[in-house]
Image (spheres, rainbow, N blue to C red):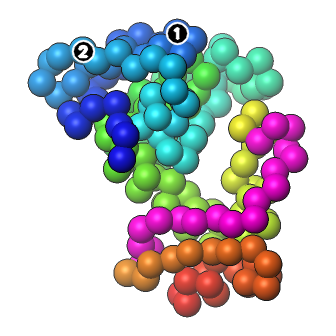
């Protein structure tokens, strides 16, 4: 797995365009440039927390960046910051993956794969909402059971049904 660093991110020092500067747990700084936002931010699920004044001009909320970060950290382990778009920055890729799994299980367990995709993906990540998803894989475990959800015949069952929860 290609990750920004094997060390833990402790602080987002700077976020501009496609560049992130992180302070790591050994007090070194690492710069992540280019690549995807999910790679730069250790955020494979592209978890985003809207706040007033972000670079995302489609956001219409009065919530401050500080309040958005506080609420994000209360909900998911390993979030150290929000970038200028509101995307979560996780201390490790694994923490980001666990947050993604938590989101799917907590908010979409009773949805079919098609419903999950429509509810999970927003316009800014899905080219205006026109997502064609033939297969969704959620790696890891939930409740001790490995899970894999496919569209088609299985897509009419809920995620919980497919996971035998």
The verdict on residue 129 being magenta is yes
Q: How many labels were placed on the picture?
A: 2
Q: Where 150 sits versus 2, above or below?
A: below
Separation (CA) of disc 1 from disc 2: 16 Å
- x, y percent for residue 28: 17, 16
Res. 65 image quadrant: top right
Mark 1 / mark 2, whichever is N-terminal: 1
45 and 48: which is toward the camera: 45
- x, y percent for residue 9: 28, 29
Q: Where 84 sits versus 162, above or below?
A: above
> Residue at horizontal 50%, vertical 45%?
44
The residue that mark 1 highlights is: 16
Q: Where 11 sits versus 75, above or below?
A: above
Can the viewer see residue 152? yes
Res. 23 image quadrant: top left
101 and 34: which is toward the camera: 34
The residue that mark 2 highlights is: 29
The verdict on residue 85 being magenta is no
Farthest-out residue, left: 26
Q: Which residues are magenta?
A: 126-143
> Residue at horizontal 46%, vertical 34%?
39
């Amino acid at each position: 797995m290609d990750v920004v660093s094997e060390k833990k991110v402790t602080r987002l020092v700077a976020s501009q365009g496609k560049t992130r500067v992180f302070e790591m747990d050994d007090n070194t700084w690492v710069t992540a440039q280019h690549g995807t936002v999910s790679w730069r931010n250790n955020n494979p699920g592209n978890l985003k927390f809207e706040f007033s004044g972000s670079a995302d001009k489609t956001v219409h909320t009065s919530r401050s960046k500080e309040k958005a970060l506080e609420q994000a950290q209360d909900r998911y382990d390993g979030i150290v910051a929000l970038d200028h778009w509101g995307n979560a920055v996780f201390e490790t890729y694994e923490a980001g993956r666990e947050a993604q799994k938590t989101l799917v299980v907590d908010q979409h367990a009773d949805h079919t794969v098609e419903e999950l995709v429509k509810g999970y993906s927003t316009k800014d990540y899905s080219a205006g909402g026109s997502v064609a998803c033939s297969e969704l894989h959620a790696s890891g475990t939930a409740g001790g059971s490995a899970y894999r959800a496919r569209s088609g015949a299985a897509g009419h069952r809920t995620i919980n049904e497919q996971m035998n929860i």
